[in-house]
Amino acid sequence: MRRRRPLTLHRHRVRTARWLLLPTLGLLAAVAAWPLARTAGLAFTDATLGSPASGRWVGLYNFAALAADPAWWEAVVNTLRFAALSVSLELGLGLGVALVLRRAFPGNSVLRAVVLLPWAIPNVVSARMWAWMAHDVYGVLNDLLLRAHLIAQPVPWLADAGTALAVIVTADVWKTTPFVALLLLAGLQAIPAGLYEAARVDGAGPWRCFRHVTLPLLRPAIAVALVFRLLDALRVFDVVYVLTGSSHTTATVSVYARQQLIDFQDFGYGSAASLAIFLLVAMGAVAVITGLRVRLEAP
């Protein structure tokens, strides 16, 4: 009788990890699999909001119409522009905040709690607050700029595409930078202090310590923050919809899909747009994770 080979430590850890992940994967499948399958099924029909179950099979017609719709591609461009601006600003500001919070000084614990306050505010409440701040008549932003004589008359921030995007990005950066800072702060605190002492003994200054010690060891935390924020930015809905509604000049792909599903009551076409959003986010996630894995594993 052939004897079993004993499990190595690595194989034992992998098997244990799979068993521990099984309940989470099962829960995700139960919560997400059916809605995704239902959306995929409706995307190939002409179902409407009034009769979603009586839709006829139309094949790839909805996807062909989606590819030919200029409003869809404008929403894709708006989404990519928003994601690029917001994620890059949040990573840069979050890293700066994390570097400050890592230092020991009086009131550090209080400052950490204060920094996290914007992240604790619900998205809709935060967006509504920024909408009032950017109001052309009652907004505090125009009031401050007028008092400082930086503008001659109130600016309708949310009426122009360029300024509206700036307000949307600012609101999202203000809301989410604390989350990025928290992730990066955890990564900074995991770096051994002895590495900095050794670098200073070798004559490295603050910039060289940051470049050759902090950044290389912080890459895994930056990768996690980047993936989380990029996935959220590609499917952003609430802050855009609260600030500018369904305006095509700022509408993202999620706002576009909501308009087709609810306003136009076209379940088939709206489901095709929703499925396209899922594929867009999935491809973005795969591209980022693959790129980061190659970068992190490179010698």
Image: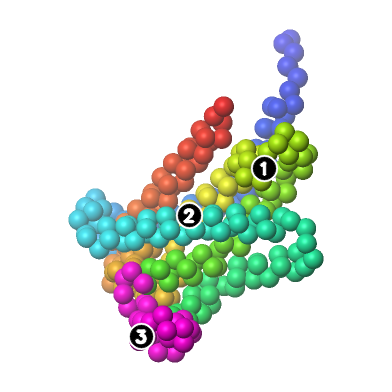
Give the quarter of the image for residue 68: bottom left
The type of residue carrying mark 3 is Ala
Q: Residue at x 28, y 61 (%)?
A: 74
Nearest to the observer: residue 199 or residue 193: 199
The type of residue carrying mark 1 is Gly
Pointers 1 and 2 in contact (C-beta within 8 Å): no
Disc 3 or disc 2, which is closer to the eye?
A: 3
Kindly report the distance in space between the C-alpha atoms of the residues bearing marks 1 and 2: 26 Å
Give the quarter of the image for residue 102: bottom right
Question: In which quadrant will I find the N terminus?
Answer: top right
Q: Can residue 118 be seen in this view?
A: yes
Q: Residue at x 67, y 58 (%)?
A: 100
Nearest to the observer: residue 249 or residue 198: 198
Q: Residue 160, percent across and down?
A: 31, 75
Q: Which residue is drawn at 23% across and 53% down?
A: 67
Q: Residue 23, percent across and down?
A: 64, 47
Above or below, 224 against 5 in this view is: below
Magenta span of residues = 135-163
Local crowd at mark 3 within 10 Å, few (<14), some, or many (≥20)? Answer: few
Q: Identify residue for label 3.
A: 152
Q: In this view, does 12 lie to the left or right of 228?
A: right
The type of residue carrying mark 2 is Ser
Local crowd at mark 1 within 10 Å, few (<14), some, or many (≥20)? Answer: few
Question: Total number of numbered labels?
Answer: 3
Nearest to the observer: residue 216 or residue 243: 216
Q: Identify residue for label 1.
A: 205
Q: Identify residue for label 2.
A: 88
